[in-house]
Image (cartoon, rainbow, N blue to C red):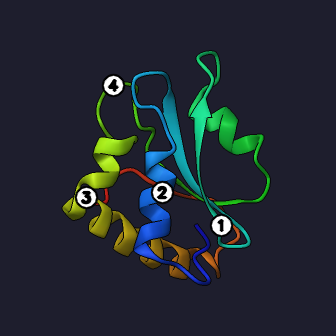
Amino acid sequence: MDLNNPTLDDLKQLYASCKDKNDHHILWICSSGKVHIDRLPANVDPEVFEKETPNMKVRFKTYHRGKGYVGKTAAADETFMSRMYRVLLEQWSKAQNSQRVRYIETYF
């Protein structure tokens, strides 16, 4: 999903492409405005992932495995997807002028 030309359907596809039962995931936005959801390896802390990702502008709280925050079920939840879409647009707007990575722990 590209926040410079976003669609809700792109966000749903991104979430649906993840497997909730297999791994923890990190939702983040890079400096170009692309939204990513990456698997978090078991031996890597989210803070280390952030430091090893130099083009990161925004990082959200980790989605823990098995909690239903990613995957096809999450993507089908219209309320959740609409909220995340609005939050991503809002955070991208704030992050563009920031030199630091914005960490978003609470967004509901």
Q: Which residue is nearer to you in this view: 107 or 10? A: 10
Task: In the rendered structure, find residue 80 and report the number of the disc placed on it.
Answer: 3
Q: Is residue 70 above or below residue 102?
A: above
Instruction: Give the Cα distance between marks 2 and 3.
Output: 14 Å
Q: Hey, what amino acid is under mark 4?
A: Gly
Identify residue type, mark 2. Answer: Gln
Please, is residue 6 above or below residue 65 in the view?
below
Position of residue 55 in the picture relative to residue 94 (left or right): right
Q: Which mark is residue 13?
A: 2
Which residue is at a point 50% across and 67% down the rendered structure image? 10
Q: Which quadrant of the figure has residue 81? A: bottom left
Q: Which residue is depicted at the point 38% across and 50% down?
A: 105
Q: Looking at the image, do the residues carrying marks 1 and 4 touch, with CB atoms under 8 Å apart?
A: no
Residue at 52%, 78% (x, y): give it. 6
Q: CA distance from mark 3 to mark 4?
A: 16 Å
Which of the numbered marks, if any, corresponds to residue 66?
A: 4
Instruction: Read off the residue under disc 1.
Output: 34
Q: Residues within 10 Å of mark 3 (few under 14, many from 20)?
A: few
Q: Which mark is residue 42?
A: none
Quadrant where the image shows the C terminus: bottom left
Image side of residue 19 versus residue 95, left or right = left
Above or below 49: residue 44: above
- Left or right of residue 87, residue 40 in this image: right
Give the SS element for disc 2: helix
